[in-house]
Image (tube, grey):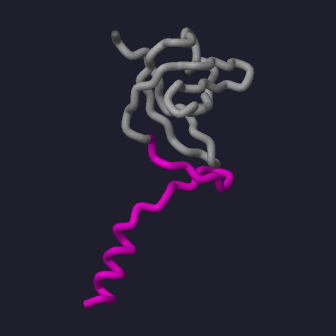
Amino acid sequence: MLSVLLVVGSCVYAAPVWARGGSVVSPPETPMVGTIRVVDLRESRIVLEERNRELFATDLRQLDGLVVGQKVQLRVQIQNGREIIYSIAPFPK
């Protein structure tokens, strides 16, 4: 019985996804809301006021129109130990 449970359990385990090139990519988190503290276009990143959370954009267009103090709704994923913006949009007031 224990052997059956171990086999079934190992089949159900959700392992991280490996992107091309061998980098680890996690599935996107559930949407969250945060307030922008820093917009750094040179580094393609933003920093949220909440816990100084630093997030990186894969495409600079993701940061178009974003300003300090703005509330945004976003989803992120972990890639190579960095938090990458999966989606971002202004949060309605």
Q: Is residue 21 left or right of residue 12?
A: right
Residue in the foreground of this view, choosing between 7 and 40: 40
Instruction: Name the image quarter holding residue 11.
Output: bottom left
Residue at 48% in and 20% down: 35
Looking at the rendered image, the quarter that the C terminus falls into is top left
> In the picture shown, does residue 46 fall above or below 3?
above
> In the picture shown, does residue 89 fall above or below 2?
above
Residue at 41% in and 24% down: 73
Q: Is residue 45 left or right of residue 26?
A: right
Q: Is residue 92 left or right of residue 35?
A: left
Residue 25 on the magenta span:
yes
Residue in the foreground of this view, choosing between 90 and 16: 90
Residue 27 on the magenta span:
yes
Residue in the foreground of this view, choosing between 35 and 41: 35
Residue sitting at the far left: 1
Which residues are the magenta region?
1-28
The percent position of residue 55, horizontal first and vertical second, equals 58, 32
Residue at 35% in and 81% down: 7
Instruction: Name the image quarter holding residue 29.
Output: top left
Residue at 25% in and 90% down: 1
> In the picture shown, does residue 30 fall above or below 17?
above
The percent position of residue 22, horizontal first and vertical second, equals 66, 56
The percent position of residue 46, horizontal first and vertical second, equals 60, 24
